[in-house]
């Protein structure tokens, strides 16, 4: 496995330090020390994915998340019934109508995840039927059992996958903790396997730390084991066919992707049940995925670096290297990269730790397109605040991101001279270069599929990219359908992309530009006289032009 060359982060060529020096020269140290009260500081280019449900599923709760900056709503089917998530989805669509804010949707599959179910289906940790906290003491014995009829207690933890006894061995390390929580030593327990009785379905373990396990679902992970389990479970297939496809879900987050075959298998199944337009985003959360990362990036439509699970499979000092490597590979390929587990403490507090705030900023500087929030919005007490805080940190990091250095990395002279650059790539890179040279306030891309706009995002311009998707009205055997809505929403996973759906009846370019200008002025993004770079087709020729806002 090859890692990214990290020499560009050396102090002799510290791009962040260089940018901060420019920032201080322009605005002074006092402006850094002052609290930012400028509303525009929250207009981050980096996207925010929010896990919805429990404390974020009513219309008012979802309106608050949309207004705070949620760009994609994640439905985690590791927990909850289809009926439960359908009610949340319907409320999201109503919230979108009320706010007129576009939001993409993502189904997160369960995969081969092994868990301890502590409560009946659809019972949340806030319900009266929620189980009591289980207290486990360091040095005590606890038995993992495949007999799900055994009540969960400090002595027995019933797991939902009978295959566990077949790949766990004495000496293995097992992690058990509340799903989507922090993995801290007080809310998660680390077990050392002493003995396995496969016939009885028992795994005898010793607690390595004292913990109090709460919630309704505990995740069980065996370090570097379980890769042979199927990536798509029968439950996942059922949910994709009967929930994701009928509800026009935009992304499928493929949990526990271990190799490229898993991506191909998922895509083939989704197409077979009528979901050809759904994007497949691979979740990298096992060490085995890193050994196949090049093929996974190439085959998928994006990557989610699930650092919570991944951190259990590798030494902690290696986690940051894996982040830099995966994000670099995604950036080069032009695939959106998502980072998870950033402000876990905001599940219960209104402010992140300094380490968490720095972590968010570093994710942006490393090249992340989006930040995913889990427990912070699923059941957190300060969900909208968490979104706003993350976006403000992202905005500050974007201000010191070295766009020029990133551009040169994406478009080395050797690539240009070799003639390997595609027409679309040449167009996108030229638009970003022109925008930088003229100090443009915005890049506008006329598109039908959103692909060209996504390529523009690859070069990380420091201004918003409006992807003006012109839909087509098609007729199937039953009714008229509008093709292009999903393409617009799927742009919400790319940094800087602002998708707008054009009127299919009136697609006059000048009229559409005036609509974008009016919207930009209303949001404070454009002013009269600002320069804007436009990519559009004139006849059969694609052109890049610079125009002034009237």
Image (cartoon, rainbow, N blue to C red):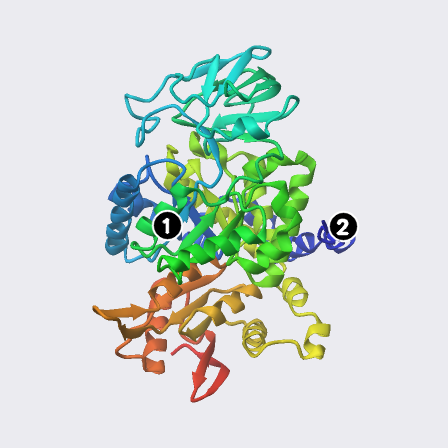
Seen as rendered, the residue at the extreme left is: 478
Mark 1: secondary structure: helix
Q: CA distance from mark 2 to mark 1?
A: 48 Å
The disc placed on residue 478 is none
Taking depth in this image into account, of 525 and 409 the one nearest to the observer is 409
Residue occupied by mark 1:
240
Select label 2 or label 1 by which is in front.
Answer: 1
Can you give x and y, in whole percent of width and height, for residue 308 in the image?
55, 36
Quarter of the image holding residue 310?
Answer: top right
Q: Position of residue 446 (x, y in %)?
A: 42, 75
Q: Is residue 371 above or below residue 510?
A: above
Q: Quadrant of residue 169?
A: top right
Residue 497 locus on image (x, y percent): 45, 63
Looking at the image, tell me whether mark 2 or mark 1 is earlier in sequence order: 2
Q: Which residue is mark 2?
A: 11
**How many numbered badges does the structure rendering display?**
2
Q: Residue at x 66, y 22 (%)?
A: 171
Q: Is residue 531 left or right of residue 503?
A: right
């Amino acid at each position: 496995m090859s890692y990214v060359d990290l020499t560009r982060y050396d102090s002799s060529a510290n791009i962040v330090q260089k940018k901060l020096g420019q920032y201080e020269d322009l605005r002074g140290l006092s402006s850094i020390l002052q609290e930012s009260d400028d509303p525009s500081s929250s207009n981050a280019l980096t996207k925010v994915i929010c896990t919805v449900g429990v404390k974020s599923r009513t219309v008012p709760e979802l309106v608050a998340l949309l207004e705070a900056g949620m760009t994609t709503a994640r439905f985690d089917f590791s927990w909850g019934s289809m009926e439960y998530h359908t009610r949340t989805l319907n409320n999201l669509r109503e919230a979108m109508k009320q706010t007129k804010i576009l939001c993409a949707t993502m189904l997160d599959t369960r995969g081969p995840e092994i868990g301890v179910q502590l409560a009946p289906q659809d019972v949340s940790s806030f319900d009266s039927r929620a189980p009591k906290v289980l207290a486990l003491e360091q040095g005590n014995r606890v038995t993992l059992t495949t007999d799900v009829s055994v009540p969960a207690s400090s002595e027995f933890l019933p797991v939902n996958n009978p295959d566990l006894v077949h790949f766990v061995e004495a000496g293995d390390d097992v992690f058990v903790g509340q799903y989507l929580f922090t993995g801290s030593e007080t809310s998660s327990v680390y077990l050392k396997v002493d003995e396995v009785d496969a016939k009885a379905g028992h795994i005898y373990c010793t607690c390595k730390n004292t913990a109090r396990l709460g919630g309704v679902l505990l995740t069980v992970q065996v370090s570097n084991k379980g890769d042979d389990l199927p990536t798509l479970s029968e439950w996942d297939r059922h949910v994709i066919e009967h929930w994701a496809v009928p509800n026009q879900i935009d992304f499928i987050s493929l949990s526990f992707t271990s190799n490229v075959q898993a991506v191909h298998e998922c895509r083939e199944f989704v197409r077979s049940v009528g979901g050809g337009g759904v994007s497949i985003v691979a979740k990298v959360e096992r060490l085995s995925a890193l050994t196949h990362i090049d093929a996974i990036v190439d085959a998928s439509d994006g990557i989610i670096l699930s650092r919570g699970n991944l951190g259990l499979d590798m030494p902690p000092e290696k986690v940051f290297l894996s982040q830099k490597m995966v994000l670099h590979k995604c950036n080069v390929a032009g695939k959106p990269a998502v980072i998870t587990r950033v402000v876990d403490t905001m599940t219960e507090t209104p402010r992140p730790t300094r380490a968490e705030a720095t972590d968010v900023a570093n994710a942006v500087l490393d090249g992340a397109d989006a930040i995913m929030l889990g427990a912070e919005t699923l059941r957190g007490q300060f969900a909208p605040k968490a979104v706003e805080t993350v976006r403000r940190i992202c905005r500050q990091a974007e201000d010191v991101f070295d766009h020029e250095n990133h551009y040169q990395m994406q478009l080395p002279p050797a690539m240009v001279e070799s003639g390997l650059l595609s027409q679309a790539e040449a167009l996108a890179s030229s638009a970003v270069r022109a925008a930088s040279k003229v100090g443009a306030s915005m890049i506008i891309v006329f598109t039908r599929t959103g692909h060209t706009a996504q390529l523009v995002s690859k070069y990380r311009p420091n201004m918003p990219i409006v992807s003006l998707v012109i839909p087509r009205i098609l007729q199937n055997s039953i009714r008229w359908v509008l093709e292009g809505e999903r393409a617009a929403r799927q742009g919400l996973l790319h940094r800087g992309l602002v998708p707008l759906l054009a009127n299919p009846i009136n697609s006059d370019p000048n009229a559409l530009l005036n609509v974008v200008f009016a919207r930009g002025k209303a949001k404070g993004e454009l002013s009269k006289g600002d320069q804007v770079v436009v990519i559009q087709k004139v006849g059969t020729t694609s052109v890049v032009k610079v125009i002034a806002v009237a």
